[in-house]
Amino acid sequence: MKSKWNEKEARKFIKEYNKKGVSRELALRIYTTRLLGNNSQLVLHGGGNTSLKLSLKNSFGKKENIIFVKGSGKDMSNIDIDGFPALELDNLIKLKKLKKISDFQMVNYQKKYMIDTTFPNASVETLLHSFLPHKYVDHTHSNAILSLIDQPMDKNICKKIFGENLAIVPYIMPGFKLAKKSSEVFKKNPKVKGLILLNHGIFTFGNTAKQSYERMIKFVSVAERELKRKSRKIKKNLYIEKKVTPSNLSNIIRKYISIPLDEDYQRKIICYSNSLFINQFFHKNVFTKINGPVTPDHVIRIKHKPLFLDFTKIKSDKIEQVIKKKLLIIKKNILIILIVTNI
Ligand code: ZN
């Protein structure tokens, strides 16, 4: 993965946003957030987040520490000023003294400390950003990082690959507890350039937008190189028997997922892919071991559990019956992946 930082482009952002009264720092925050958001290997719409800490004058002319954090659900690829709610940083940091707060209380505090309440709610990872001292903080659910560490011996892998550059935070659901733990881990390792959050993603930080962004690219590239070194070629799918064709299969699936559910009648669109990569990935020996998507960004789109339909074990005349049975027990609005062999 290569850095897409471009001095000319960065200067253009500063100039354009200056006309709108936006600071140089925030213009560059927008610039590198878009760089991250435009790389689907790092971030998908809704995932990832970034922040910037500044000291600004409030309405009374007094200097106040402010954090700009990505708004919840905002798309990093085309984010603008309205995607960065500003919050009173010192008040957020005070929350660290508390032992426990519920998710509801956390969101409530985040709303309470907003400078302009017409902005969207700040990300659920706002406190994690706030509890770190760095001016710029970047966070992604990078495919390469998670592919490398979502496996046994994750800590050892991180130590070996990232050494003293990144500290490791154990898995905790995003929220107050994770923010506190991440802050503790950082305090014990104040020289690190970022954090690995096990089963979750990576944080990098820096004094400038460029430094924080390029650290992200650097560590993701380290993970990519390691994956490449370790990857083994999976044998091409060998199944040749053809029981069903994609077109009649998609008709059967549509028939059962488009049925009326409660008062809604939802028609679904089916996409079919049969690329070499897909075939290799869902090879019989591999797909039964897959436990859902690798990153939180993917969960937003395909939910946490795919439905597997293995046609090697289904007789031709029973296909519709099996699909009907499996699909009818799936709840409304759940997106599914169909893993199909033999077609
Ligand atoms: Zn995250």
Image: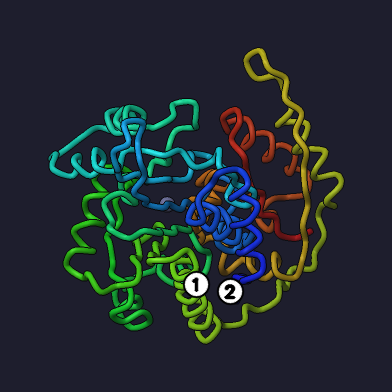
What is the C-alpha distance between the residues marked 1 and 2? 6 Å
The residue shown at (44%, 33%) is 121
Q: Is residue 302 visible?
A: no
Q: What quarter of the picture does the C terminus occupy?
A: bottom right
Please name whichever residue, 62 or 32, is drawn nearer the observer in this view of the structure.
62
In the picture, the disc for residue 230 is none
| Relative depth, front residue between 41 and 277 | 41
- Tags 1 and 2 in contact by the CB under 8 Å rule? yes
User: Image check: 9 left or right of 83?
Assistant: right
User: Mark 1 Cα within 10 Å, few/some/many (few <14, many 20+)?
Assistant: many
How dense is the environment of label 2, judged by Cα within 10 Å: few (below 14), some, or many (20 and up)? some
Query: Measured along the vertical axis of the image, is residue 46 above or below residue 141?
Result: above
Q: Position of residue 145 (x, y in %)?
A: 46, 68
Q: Amino acid at mark 1?
A: Glu
Residue 37 in which image quadrant: bottom right
The residue that label 1 is drawn on is 214
For label 2, the residue is 3
Q: Is mark 1 within 8 Å of ligand 1?
A: no
Label tally: 2
Instruction: Give how far across and how far down residue 124 sits, in percent.
Output: 39, 41
Q: Quadrant of residue 167?
A: bottom left
Q: Residue at x 18, y 58 (%)?
A: 184
Q: Is residue 27 above or below residue 61?
A: below
